[in-house]
């Protein structure tokens, strides 16, 4: 059964694309390449450049390939950017998704997996976050994703459509086979920024906020390997194909690491010391966000294989070195 992956040239979407291809599943990719990279999609995988809001394009792709399954990654994902440009985030994440849902339903799509985020929870006074907890985002990014979840829920209730929403936490690392990784030069992801600092690509690393109510004063997050996130999406597809009901599930390991923990691990793995600057808090950053992922494991049978911060950092560092080597060769 052919699967449409929106945002398949981006960081997480490209890992999903490879995961499906490795399983022998036919894949089709749509990406507008605003943050994705054309070279992330192999030549043997059908690729269409455009927006998921383009109903004519999406409808043609769905019909040409007989697609009944969509995995939707296409979105803007930087929390501070969403604070600066909320309308842009609502347009790209919420309004565009609404057009995609409508086109999918009009063309008989039956199974939908949506890439959501832990940012829908906002600031919670809890050691771990369960799916039953209130959803009160503290950023436009979180609200844009929550609005999209609500639209998908209501559309599925009115039409013959089943879905899984995966609310994942802080995704990091790279494909263990080094086929794809986080390639955006100025990405704000902590692990990416830290390994770039270790390699001298960035002159320093900033800690945004050191007065949070956490053990060392810096934010605590649940860092999950991107390959395990892709595996969770595959498990979600298999779950839907078995005729199971729609579900909203957290996607994380259930363990938190502080910003300082991550910096220490990057220094240890890379063998490099680098300047670390303490800066004020950023708008939209909760103090602690750690997943309760029991439902994901129980319902989907998800079994992560890279639940180790050292492994996550090592793969991210190896990918960054690969990018740096490619830049060096192209400059010669």
Image (tube, rainbow, N blue to C red):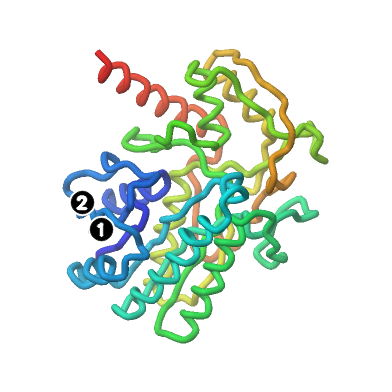
Disc 1 element:
strand
Residue in view at x 26 percent, y 45 percent: 41
| Vertical order, 264 against 87 (above or below) | above
Residue in view at x 55 percent, y 41 percent: 307
Mark 2 and mark 1: Cα distance apart in space? 6 Å
Residue in view at x 54 percent, y 21 percent: 197
Q: Quadrant of residue 75?
A: bottom left
Report the side of 7 relative to 249 (left or right): left
| Percent position of residue 7, x then y | 37, 53
Q: Is residue 269 visible?
A: yes
Q: Is residue 293 visible?
A: no
Judge by depth and name the residue closer to the eye, 225 or 171: 171
- Mark earlier in primary sequence (2, 1): 1
The residue beneath circle 2 is 45
Residue in view at x 68 percent, y 48 percent: 284
The residue beneath circle 1 is 28
Report the side of 290 relative to 18 (left or right): right
| Percent position of residue 303, x then y | 50, 51
């Amino acid at each position: 059964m052919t699967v449409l992956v929106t945002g398949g040239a981006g960081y997480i979407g490209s890992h999903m694309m490879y995961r499906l291809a490795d399983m022998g599943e036919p894949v089709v990719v749509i990406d507008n390449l605003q943050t994705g990279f054309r070279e992330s999609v192999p030549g043997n995988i059908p690729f269409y450049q455009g927006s998921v809001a383009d109903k004519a394009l999406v409808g043609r792709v769905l019909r040409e390939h007989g697609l009944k399954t969509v995995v939707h990654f296409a979105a803007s994902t930087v929390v501070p950017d969403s604070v600066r440009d909320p309308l842009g985030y609502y347009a790209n994440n919420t309004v565009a998704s609404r057009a995609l849902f409508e086109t999918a339903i009009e063309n008989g799509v039956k199974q939908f997996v949506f890439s959501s985020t832990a940012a829908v929870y906002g600031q919670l006074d809890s050691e771990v976050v369960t799916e039953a907890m209130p959803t009160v985002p503290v950023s436009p990014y979180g609200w844009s994703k929550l609005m999209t979840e609500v639209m998908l829920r209501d559309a599925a209730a009115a039409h013959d459509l089943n879905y899984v929403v995966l609310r994942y936490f802080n995704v990091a690392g790279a494909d263990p086979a080094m086929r794809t990784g986080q390639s955006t030069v100025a990405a704000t992801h902590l692990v990416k920024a830290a390994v770039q600092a270790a390699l001298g690509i960035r002159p320093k690393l900033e800690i945004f906020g050191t007065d949070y109510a956490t053990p060392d004063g810096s934010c605590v997050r649940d860092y999950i390997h991107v390959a395990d996130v892709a595996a969770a999406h595959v498990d979600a597809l298999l779950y839907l194909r078995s005729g199971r009901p729609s579900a909203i599930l957290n996607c994380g390991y259930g363990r938190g690491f502080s910003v300082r923990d991550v910096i220490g691990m990057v220094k240890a793995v890379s063998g490099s010391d680098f300047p670390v600057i303490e800066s004020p808090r950023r708008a939209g950053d909760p103090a602690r966000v750690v997943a309760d992922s029991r439902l994901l494991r129980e319902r989907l049978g998800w079994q992560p294989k890279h639940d180790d911060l050292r492994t996550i950092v090592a793969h991210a560092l190896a990918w960054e070195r690969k990018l740096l080597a490619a830049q060096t060769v192209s400059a010669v």
